[in-house]
Image (cartoon, rainbow, N blue to C red):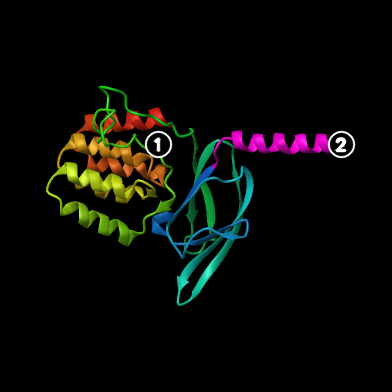
Amino acid sequence: MHRFLLLLLSYLLLGFGSLQAAPVAASIAGERGLAFRLSLDGQPVSRGARPQVYLDQLRLGYHWADFFIPAGRGRGYNYRTQIFLPDGFETNFVLVARPGFPPALRTVSTVPLAPPVVSYPTPGHPAPGYPAYPSPGYPAYPAYQTPVYQLAPAEVDNLLQAIQRRPFDDARMAIMRDALRDSFIESEDARRLIKSLSFDENRIETAKFLYSRVADRHNFYQVYDALVFASSIREVQEYVQSVR
């Protein structure tokens, strides 16, 4: 009986530790738009070949990453490597496959991950896009949701067309926020979306919003090309530094 209780206690402690563990995430991008299929620890994680994969809710430590790089006409190359994912960090990788050289996976950056912060508007200080709280018939401000799906290039094109059909920035930003509530995009696509806005102050606000929804954050510098003024770039850079 005593041994059973000790075993039960150890399982409870193990379960509690897993609940308290810091998040672990990774992003893998193909160099120059290189498309690939990925399996992690023997489990497929990408639907078809794509140039970018974002992974979250991962187990810390070592993982086996198996890549298939299409080469046309049904052919391709297999590449296997082991990656290490530290506790509480997002690790960004780039997959390199150049003619005459074997494929290689390189670590680009390791960024600390902070747990989502749930915030609600207070009287006199409404959240962006929401009226002063409380407001009759208006729902409570929603908690931040971690994006779980990356938009394909065709989906980004459709979103951009829908945005460009609206004449004013407010409507364009509303569509953008709704479409990207639970989705990731690439930095280049974020730049295109931001550039569709007319006023730099709206571009700044949107750049800050999109930072948490960019899968390849090591390429976020591409977004700055959509900002008109140097002061606008500095403001977004300061924001990025503050949330890292």
Gap between marks 1 and 2 measured at Cα: 43 Å
Task: Give percent across and percent down for residue 227.
Answer: 22, 39
Which residue is identified by label 2? 3
The segment highlighted magenta reads 1-24
Magenta stretch: residue 12 in it? yes
Task: Give percent across and percent down for residue 150.
Answer: 40, 53
Majority secondary structure of magenta residues: helix
Say if residue 148 shows up in the picture.
yes
Under mark 1, the amino acid is Ala
Task: Give percent across and percent down for residue 5.
Answer: 81, 35
Under mark 2, the amino acid is Arg
> Residue 128's image quarter?
top left
Disc 2 crowd, CA 10 A, few/some/many (<14, 14-19, 20+): few
In the rendered structure, the answer to whether residue 149 lies left or right of residue 41 reads: left
In the rendered structure, the answer to whether residue 241 lies left or right of residue 81 reads: left
Tell me the number on the disc at residue 143.
Answer: 1
| Residue ID at (34%, 34%) | 140
Quarter containing the N terminus: top right
In the rendered structure, the answer to whether residue 208 lies left or right of residue 202 reads: right
Q: What element carries label 1?
A: loop
| Residue ID at (48%, 68%) | 70
Q: Nearer the viewer, residue 146 or 7?
A: 7
Disc 1 crowd, CA 10 A, few/some/many (<14, 14-19, 20+): few
Say if residue 197 shows up in the picture.
no
